[in-house]
Image: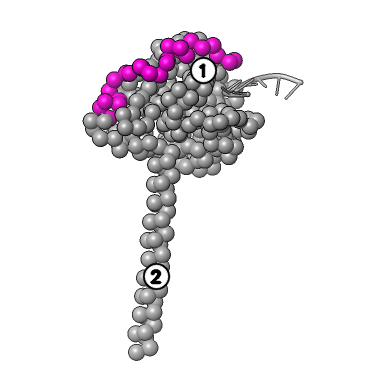
Amino acid sequence: MLRHTFLRRMMRRAGVAVLFAAVGSGLWYMQEREVRDRLSWMGVPTWAEVTPLSLHRVLRNDGYLLGWSDLRVSPLWVSNVLHEVENPHAGERPGFRQDWRSLWPVTPDSYAHSGYDRGHLAPNYAIAVVHGRDAQRDTFLMSNMTPQRPDLNRRLWQRLEEVVIDRFVPRLGTLQVIAGPVFDDDFLDGMLNRVGLVEVPEAFYKILVVPGERPRALAFLMPQDVNGDEPLDRFVVSIDEIEARTGLDFFPQLSPAAAESLEAGVATEGWGLEEVARLPGRF
DNA sequence: TTTGCTGT
């Protein structure tokens, strides 16, 4: 009899524990979903085809999300939202920091004497202005860096980032931005072509979307090997082309019809791209 | 007001 009540009491406790775990993980899941929805319109990028090289873990940062590949030792995509602000102001540049969530030791020194820059994917200035100081600090995590040639990083890519926050956002309002690297198809080349442990991309993409009833998109694909003073509109591509080059599926929550109309073609009307394509660089 | 590196 005594034994019987003891068992029942234990069962009840176990039940309560399971209930707590279920509610807790349910709440965690809902909150995670809520954050992801806020930081990534129509869902975070996913892989079109499951291979070891396409796997990524979603790392949550202040102001942006990042898909981390443990095999490439590299981000595969970063996603953030930009909107207009009253008085744009960015604090002083914080220092580069190791991101312990990457597991692999990628330190601020890892790129030294490599000939490559530590190139931001989620940009310092735009994120700082829109999302504040803590978000700005998060853009300096080494997990947000990819090896970029200086002429790309400091010139062409910098001009693109400047045009996005200074021209496109005021003109079009809120923008969903996704940026990331493009890698060589060859597995062995990828294993050998590294800065420290980090795989060196052969190109970079940036996708801009104006969300809404009839969303509009503009996408760029820029190779490492540029002079830096090329007009930006030379690098415009369709989202489908970026998906083909990266193996990623962007905006997976779009219906097939909506995805087709947004991603299949190139439509530059309305962006004012001609006016900004040749603006000189800052550096 | 926006990118970085190297050498001291």
Gap between marks 1 and 2 measured at Cα = 57 Å
Write the residue at 60% across / 25% down.
Answer: A112
Principal SS element in the magenta part? Answer: loop
Residues at marks 1 and 2 on the same chain:
yes
Residue under pointer 2: A16
Residue A130 percent coordinates (x, y): 53, 33
Q: Is disc 2 placed on a helix, strand or loop?
A: helix
Three-letter amino acid code of the residue under disc 2: Val
Q: Is residue A261 above or below residue A29?
A: above
- Tell us which disc is closer to us: 1 or 2: 1
**Is A277 in the magenta?**
yes
Q: Which residues are magenta?
A: A259-283
Residue A188 visible, this angle: no
Q: How busy is the neighbourhood of tag 1: few (under 14 within 10 Å), some, or many (20 plus)?
A: many
Write the residue at 53% across / 29% down.
Answer: A126
Q: Is residue A252 left or right of residue A220?
A: left
Q: Are marks 1 and 2 in contact (CB under 8 Å)?
A: no
